[in-house]
Image: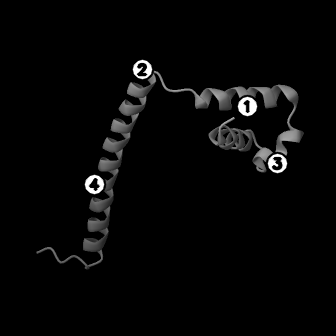
Amino acid sequence: MKPQFFTNLDSLIKLAGYSEGMEAMQQLDRSLADSLRTKAIELERPLSEKQKKQIDSLWTIQTQIDSLNTLQLIATIETAFCNHQFCTIS
């Protein structure tokens, strides 16, 4: 197994509610442990072209959202400064 498999498995165990991660492996019931191992293996597989396009699309959307949030934050800060007479804009 690749080291990434164990990193993925550790994260999946933590997501399942076991904050100790891999250290809690003995506490998991067999079906949960098998399910998490299967998911960790699936995460190792290369992405299909369709999956790559979906991820690229999501990144594009996230970038647009981040840009809008940045502009909104700047406007909010400018408004707050101007309302407190820190504004130097004439």
Q: Position of residue 58 (x, y in %)?
A: 40, 34
Q: Earlier in the sequence, mark 4 or mark 1?
A: 1
Name the residue type under label 2.
Lys
Badge 1 density bin: few <14, some 14–19, many ≥20, Cα 10 Å: many
* Upstream in sequence: badge 2 or badge 3: 3
Find numbered disc 3 in the image and state the secondary structure of the residue it sits on: helix
Query: In what element is the residue under mark 2?
Result: helix
CB under 8 Å between discs 1 and 2? no
Residue type for callout 3: Glu
Whether pointer 2 and pointer 3 mark residues with C-beta atoms closer than 8 Å, the reply is no
| Numbered mark located on residue 23 in the image | 3
Q: CA distance from mark 1 to mark 2?
A: 24 Å
Residue of label 1: 36
Residue at label 4? 71
Give the mark, 4 or 2, whose residue is nearer the N terminus: 2
Question: Which residue is rendered at x = 75% and y = 26% of the image?
Answer: 35
4 or 1: mark nearer the eye:
1
Amino acid at the residue labelled 1: Leu
Q: Would you identify the image quadrant in which residue 36 lies?
A: top right
Which image quadrant is residue 33 in? top right
Q: 50 above or below 13?
A: above
Closer to the camera in the image, 1 or 57: 1
What residue is shown with label 2? 50
Q: CA distance from mark 4 to mark 2?
A: 32 Å
Q: Please tell me whether mark 4 or mark 2 is closer to you in this view.
A: 2
Nearest the eye: 70 or 45: 45
Q: Which mark is residue 13?
A: none
